[in-house]
Amino acid sequence: MIKGLPLFPEQASTVAGQVDALYFFLIAVSGFFALLIAAAVVIFAIVYRRRATDTAPRPVHGSTALELTWSLIPFGIAMVMFFWGASVYFTMKYPPDNAIPIWVTGKQWMWKLQHQTGRREINELHVPVGRPVLLTMTSEDVIHSFYVPAFRVKQDVLPGRYTTLWFEATRTGRFHLFCAEYCGTQHSRMIGSIVVMEPAAYQQWLATSPTAAATGGGAAAADGGGKSMAAQGEALFGQLGCGACHQAAGGALGPSLVGVFGSEVPLEDGSTVTADANFLRKSILEPQAQIVKGFQPIMPTFKGQVTEEQIQQIIEYIKSLKATADNGQGQG
């Protein structure tokens, strides 16, 4: 319906049609009532215009049926909007389990992206068609907003925490990527592209190992020496000496990280927290903020010692630690 309208980008994701349908329903309802109210104003102004000064006005009597009509109809329409909007929101909020994870870091004025294989990109993201993609995003400086009009998805990217966004592209091609939050004097330069490829071509591209560092917008960045994100995180984990305390064996100074990602962790204050990316990031940068039950607050902060991208690599390494049924030791 909107393919020929220059005001609307093409629909290129699984949720684009749902978002557009809800949007046009809201426009139609708003337009209908705007016209209805305007017409009522004109009609009432004519019918109930001022008469001669000696003409007594007609008495106005209440109407239960009329009051129920103008109350129940708007209520029903509002409920349709609410449940329809909630349905679209939950669809866009919760990604499928098989979504491909990709890390995103916003920075004045570029988008830095890391694939699990270790390949990195700047201002350009390659994804396969027909596969859900989950972006975990943060910012190094100010608030940004990851916006792909053709996919009808947009999510704020915040410093100090992780936000997520997922989409599934339905057609191949190159689509605009914008920052939708004014983030500084050169905000307009913070643009890029989403390159949607056939699955086989994407796997071939992903296996390619560029050796040159990024040279600017649209260029592929170095891939971390060909190592996966988890492997790079494991190397950092060792360089920072984290393994000295976080051992799987009992009696260690720090809690075991084997199988911790996604689990419920009890804290010293009696509460529990889900060990997601935000919790792990905070534990690395603000280790005294949430102390795990049974351990002393002796972990030093690593603020200023690791970049946002390195934190993401360490989290990927922790995610990769799985407990074995035999000995409870971690494995990458």
Image: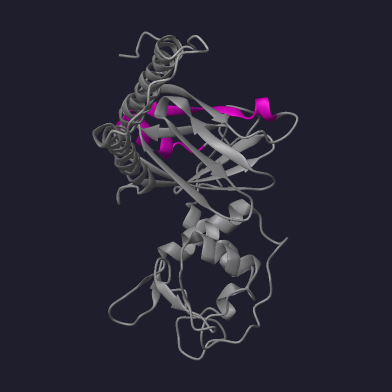
Q: Provide residue 135's location: percent of width, then percent of height.
A: 46, 45
Q: How does the figure colour the protein chain or chains?
A: one colour
Q: Is residue 288 above or below residue 141?
A: below
Q: What is the quadrant of the N terminus in the image?
A: top left
Where, by quadrant of the figure, is residue 142 drawn?
top right
Q: Is residue 60 above or below residue 116?
A: above
The verdict on residue 171 being magenta is: no
Q: What is the quadrant of the C terminus in the image?
A: bottom left
Seen in the image, is 88 located left or right of residue 152? left
In depth, the one of 293 and 128 nearer the eye is 293
Q: Provide residue 60's location: percent of width, then percent of height.
A: 36, 27
Seen in the image, is 310 located left or right of residue 263? right
The verdict on residue 190 being magenta is: yes
Whether residue 234 is visible here, answered yes or no, is no
Range of residues picked out in magenta: 187-209
In depth, the one of 109 and 236 nearer the eye is 109
